[in-house]
Image (cartoon, helix red, strand yellow):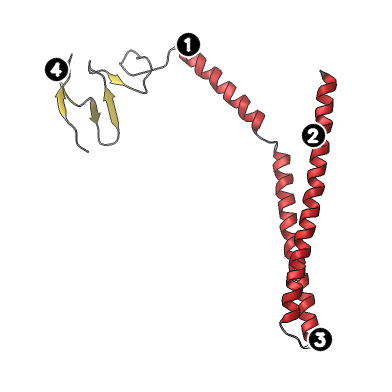
Amino acid sequence: MIVIPRCGAASGRLTFAGWASNGASLRRFDRRGAFVHAGFGTDFAGSVLPDADQKADLDALGARLAAAQAKHTPPREVAQRALASGTRYAVEIAVATMVGFAIGWQLDSWFGTKPWMAILFLMLGLAAGFTNLMRAVNREAAAVKADQAAAQAQRQEGE
């Protein structure tokens, strides 16, 4: 890092372009040579501390941010239900594919047509798995729409 030495305006002491370092951290000094920290008002030692009004404003902002995050964060049980549904869908596709392959493998051993029946039934099992997936997703989507419609109706009745 290149630093440019200059003389402080009010104090006449040598600073490095308004910055000083102790090897571990950089400190910023203003033109008077007072230590500046984070850009708020200064305390008795010249370092910066927020005044009471700023602290109250920051606390109010923090409370509003927490309320907004709580409003837009889904409840934990909703997230767990979504994870369970996703896992169930993945297992259904995998099991349908494996069952299709196993049926094809067995048919190949009976008819001596290796690997054609295994490939064919693997594809059929995969298609069956995705068909089941689409049915389950459509069922859940219909249930969610019904729940939303019921909630909307309750809100309109309350108004």
Q: Earlier in the sequence, mark 4 or mark 2?
A: 4
Label 2, on which residue?
148
Q: Earlier in the sequence, mark 2 or mark 3?
A: 3
Position of residue 128 measured from the top left corner of the image (x, y, whole percent): 79, 64
Front of the two marks 4 and 3? 3
Q: Quick one: quadrant of the N terminus?
A: top left
Position of residue 6 measured from the top left corner of the image (x, y, whole percent): 15, 24
Q: Amino acid type of disc 1?
A: Asp
Disc 1 secondary structure class: helix
Of 99 and 153, nearer the camera is 153
Look at the picture and state if 26 lies above or below 77: above
Label 3, on which residue?
110
User: Residue at position x 70%, y 36% from top?
Assistant: 75
Left or right of residue 64, residue 120 in this image: right
User: Residue at position x 73%, y 70% from top?
Assistant: 123
Disc 2 secondary structure class: helix
Q: Earlier in the sequence, mark 3 or mark 1?
A: 1
Badge 2 local density, few (<14 within 10 Å), some, or many (20+)? Answer: few
Front of the two marks 3 and 1? 3
User: Residue at position x 85%, y 21% from top?
Assistant: 157
Cα–Cα span, label 2 and label 3: 53 Å
Q: Residue furthest bottom?
A: 112
Residue 12 - label:
4
Position of residue 104 measured from the top left corner of the image (x, y, whole percent): 77, 77
Residue 104 in sight: yes
Q: Amino acid type of disc 4?
A: Gly
Q: Quick one: quadrant of the C terminus?
A: top right
Position of residue 65 measured from the top left corner of the image (x, y, whole percent): 57, 25
Of 47 and 74, nearer the camera is 74
Badge 4 local density, few (<14 within 10 Å), some, or many (20+)? Answer: few
